[in-house]
């Protein structure tokens, strides 16, 4: 019985540690710089793979196609500059464009949607 439990635990650890792998070019990048020096980032790839770094803790998820389409629609509207008074300061890069930092976090903006992904790992928590 102990060996079965150990095997199940080993399989669970392996499944959790081998998250989805990102492929292709980065479609969007978000960075968050907090006033206390804490740094976070997220990279969304064109195939929906997302790699997030929360101060050295890396997480991976895959966004469904409908959420990737929402991000693309928001990206088509552009990224408006925000305020340096925000905490955190959010920066957004679309494809190979220059980053916009600080980026405006208005509801429905690309920066706000990416910020939501970084917080909740989905657009619709």
Image: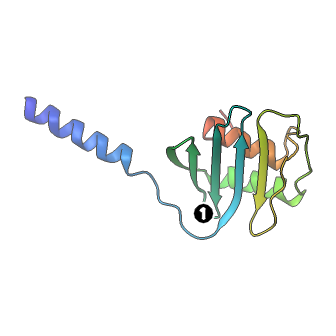
How many labels, in total?
1
Residue 7 appears in which quarter of the rendering? top left
x, y percent for residue 2: 9, 29
x, y percent for residue 98: 82, 65
x, y percent for residue 4: 12, 35
In this rendering, would 9 be left or right of 85? left
Q: Is residue 123 visible?
A: no
Position of 77 relative to 53 (above/below): below
In this rendering, would 5 be left or right of 29? left
Q: Local crowd at mark 1 within 10 Å, few (<14), some, or many (≥20)?
A: some
Give the SS element for disc 1: loop
Residue at numbered disc 1: 47
Residue drawn at x 80%, y 59% is: 99
Which of the two residues, 77 or 102, is positioned nearer the viewer here? 102
Residue drawn at x 78%, y 49% is: 91
x, y percent for residue 55: 57, 40
Q: Is residue 9 visible?
A: yes
Residue 44 appears in which quarter of the rendering? bottom right
Colour scheme of this structure image?
Answer: rainbow
Locate the C terminus by quadrant: top right
Locate the N terminus by quadrant: top left
Which of the two residues, 125 or 78, is positioned nearer the viewer here? 78
Which of the two residues, 105 or 57, is positioned nearer the viewer here? 57
Position of 112 relative to 67 (above/below): above
Residue drawn at x 50%, y 46% is: 58
């Amino acid at each position: 019985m102990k060996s079965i439990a150990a095997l199940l635990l080993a399989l669970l650890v392996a499944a959790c540690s081998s998250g989805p792998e990102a492929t292709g070019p980065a479609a969007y990048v978000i960075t968050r710089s907090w006033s206390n020096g804490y740094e976070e980032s997220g990279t969304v790839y064109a195939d929906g793979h997302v790699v997030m770094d929360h101060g050295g803790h890396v997480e991976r998820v895959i966004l469904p196609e409908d959420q990737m389409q929402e991000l693309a629609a928001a990206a088509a509207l552009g990224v408006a500059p925000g305020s340096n008074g925000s905490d955190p300061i959010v920066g957004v890069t679309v494809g190979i464009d220059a980053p916009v930092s600080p980026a405006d976090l208005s509801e429905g903006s690309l920066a706000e949607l990416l910020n939501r992904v970084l917080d909740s790992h989905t657009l619709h928590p």
